[in-house]
């Protein structure tokens, strides 16, 4: 039990940096668009086959879950780090962003020999992951110094992000599903 929990004083004034919130919301939007793309392609492929039966839909659902999990897991950790003040999620996100930065750096070194566009994309990925990693690490240090407990109650921001996420997933999935291939 933390000191603030023992005293009954929850620190509600502790807020993450605005830039970190921006990157978190942007990451959530991009991830939901990717999941919508996965759902749309999977549904399109299931409906495009000659035989549509329960087994085919079962395979489609499994494919959606398996392909969406690697996208959703880091975003969920990033959300928990920024908005819910979970310290372990902040550590996990910092480690994941460090791995992304390392892969981007070595990919950029390899890409310089064959593609300027790939080099530029990987350079931007490296810069963004380093900046967000720095912001997230600073946020984790602030949480540790202030001894802030995780946020346990439901907020309207949670409902808003859930609604926007479902809207993005469904609209991108519908657009992909109805695309004239």
Image (cartoon, helix red, strand yellow):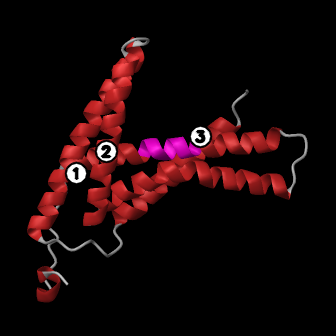
Asked if the magenta segment contains residue 62, the reply would be: no
Tag 2 or tag 3, which sits nearer the N-term? 3
Residue that carries the numbered disc 3 in the rendered image:
37
Question: Residue at the location (14% across, 88% down)?
Answer: 6
In the depicted view, which residue is nearer to us: 163 or 137?
Answer: 137
Res. 73 image quadrant? bottom left
Residue that carries the numbered disc 1 in the rendered image:
136
Mark 3 surroundings: few (<14), some (14-19) or many (≥20) residues within 10 A:
many
Q: Residue 84, can we see it? A: no
Label at residue 97: 2
Mark 2 residue element: helix
Disc 3 or disc 2, which is closer to the eye?
2
Res. 128 image quadrant? top left
Mark 1 surroundings: few (<14), some (14-19) or many (≥20) residues within 10 A:
many
Disc 1 or disc 3, which is closer to the eye?
1
Q: Quadrant of the C terminus?
A: top right
Q: How many circles with numbers are drawn on the protein?
A: 3
Mark 2 surroundings: few (<14), some (14-19) or many (≥20) residues within 10 A:
many
């Amino acid at each position: 039990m933390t000191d603030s929990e023992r005293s009954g004083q929850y620190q509600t004034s502790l807020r993450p940096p605005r830039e970190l919130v921006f990157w978190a919301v942007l990451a959530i939007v991009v991830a939901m668009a990717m999941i919508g793309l996965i759902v749309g392609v999977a549904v399109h492929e299931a409906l495009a086959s000659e035989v549509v039966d329960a087994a085919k839909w079962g395979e489609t659902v499994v494919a959606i879950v398996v392909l969406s999990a690697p996208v959703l897991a880091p975003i969920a950790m990033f959300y928990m780090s920024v908005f819910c003040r979970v310290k372990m999620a902040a550590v996990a996100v910092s480690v994941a962003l460090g791995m992304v930065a390392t892969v981007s750096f070595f990919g950029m070194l390899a890409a310089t020999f064959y593609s300027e566009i790939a080099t530029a994309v990987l350079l931007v990925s490296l810069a963004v992951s380093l900046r967000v990693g720095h912001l997230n690490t600073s946020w984790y240090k602030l949480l540790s110094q202030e001894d802030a407990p995780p946020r346990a109650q439901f907020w309207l921001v949670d409902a808003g992000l859930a609604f926007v996420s479902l809207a993005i997933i469904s609209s991108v999935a519908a657009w992909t599903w109805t695309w004239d291939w």
